[in-house]
C-alpha cells in the first residue's frame, strides 16, 4: 500500500467511495503488547467522528480499571455535556477472570463469556454501535467457550455500517481469513526481558 494507495482495485462494480465506506472487521493478534492499545487508538478516532463506541472486555479482571476505561468514560461525559464526539459504552463481559484463568471456575467463566457474546450479537442486529472493540476476544474462542464459526458467520452477516475490532493472541485462522485487516504484534524487545515489570501510564 505505497503512499496509501491500494495495490489492486477489484472489478466489483463499486465506486472508490462505495468501497471506502464498507465496514471493516479488524484483528489485532500476536504475542507482543499493544494489541488493545492500537484498538483503543482506533476508538479515539471513531469518537472524534461522532461514532457510537462499544467496548467489550472479555478477559480483563472486573476489578482492574485500565487508563483507557477512565479516559473513555470522560469522553462519554464530554459528549453528553457538549455534543462533541460520540457516546461510549464500556462493558466487562466476564466474571473477573483473566487470561491466566483460575482453576475450578471454567464453567462459570465460559457461561459469562457466552452471554457476553450473545449481548454483542443482539447489539449488532440492532445496529447499536458504529465501532465495537472486542478486547481479548480471541481467548474464549481458543478455549472453546464461544464457537469460532458462529462468530465469523455473525460478523459476516452484520447489517449496516458497523466496524468490529477483535484483539488477543493466537487468533483462529478462520477469523484471520474472514477479517479485512489483520495485524500481528511481534516482539523485538521488551523491558521485561531485563526484569522490568509494567509501569503506570505505560501498561495501565
Image: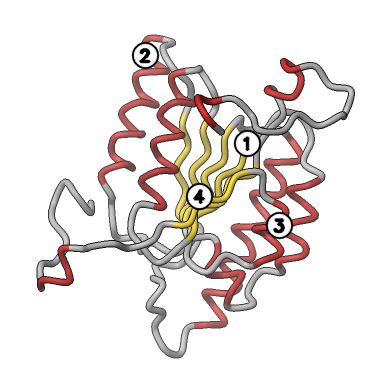
What SS does tag 4 mark?
strand
Q: Which residue is mark 1?
A: 163
Q: Position of residue 41 (x, y in %)?
A: 39, 36
Quarter of the view holding residue 126? top right
Mark 3–mark 1 Cα distance, whole angstroms, equals 16 Å
What SS does tag 3 mark?
helix
Mark 1–mark 4 Cα distance, whole angstroms, equals 14 Å
Numbered tag placed on residue 56 in the rendering = 4
Question: Which residue is pictured at 63% across the width and 74% down the height?
Answer: 145
Q: Nearer the viewer, mark 3 or mark 1?
A: 3
What SS does tag 1 mark?
strand
**Contact? badges 3 and 4 (CB < 8 Å):** no
Mark 2–mark 3 Cα distance, whole angstroms, equals 41 Å
Q: Nearer the viewer, mark 4 or mark 2?
A: 4
* Earlier sequence position, callout 3 versus callout 4: 4
* Earlier sequence position, callout 1 versus callout 4: 4
Q: Count up the numbered dots.
A: 4
Depicted 193 relative to depicted 203: above or below = below
What crowding class fits label 4: few (fewer than 14 Cα within 10 Å), some (14-19), or many (20 or more)? many
Q: Which residue is mark 3?
A: 177
Depicted 129 relative to depicted 95: above or below = above
Amino acid at each position: 500500500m505505497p503512499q496509501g494507495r491500494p495495490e489492486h482495485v477489484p472489478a466489483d462494480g463499486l465506486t472508490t467511495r462505495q468501497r471506502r465506506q464498507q465496514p471493516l472487521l479488524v484483528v489485532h493478534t500476536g504475542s507482543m503488547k499493544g494489541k488493545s492499545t492500537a484498538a483503543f487508538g482506533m476508538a479515539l478516532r471513531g469518537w472524534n467522528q461522532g461514532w457510537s463506541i462499544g467496548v467489550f472486555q472479555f478477559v480483563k479482571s472486573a476489578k482492574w480499571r485500565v487508563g483507557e476505561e477512565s479516559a473513555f468514560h470522560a469522553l462519554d461525559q464530554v459528549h453528553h455535556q457538549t455534543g462533541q464526539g460520540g457516546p461510549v459504552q464500556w462493558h466487562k463481559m466476564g466474571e473477573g477472570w483473566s487470561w491466566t484463568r483460575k482453576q475450578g471456575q471454567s464453567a462459570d467463566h465460559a457461561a459469562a463469556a457466552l452471554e457476553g457474546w450473545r449481548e454483542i450479537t443482539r447489539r449488532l442486529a440492532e445496529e447499536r454501535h458504529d465501532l465495537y472493540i472486542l478486547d481479548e476476544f480471541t481467548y474464549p474462542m481458543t478455549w472453546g467457550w464461544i464457537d469460532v464459526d458462529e462468530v465469523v458467520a455473525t460478523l459476516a452477516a452484520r447489517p449496516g455500517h458497523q466496524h468490529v475490532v477483535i484483539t488477543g493472541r493466537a487468533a483462529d485462522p478462520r477469523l484471520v481469513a474472514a477479517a479485512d485487516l489483520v495485524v500481528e504484534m511481534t516482539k523485538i524487545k521488551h523491558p521485561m526481558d531485563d526484569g522490568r515489570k509494567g509501569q503506570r501510564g505505560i501498561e495501565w
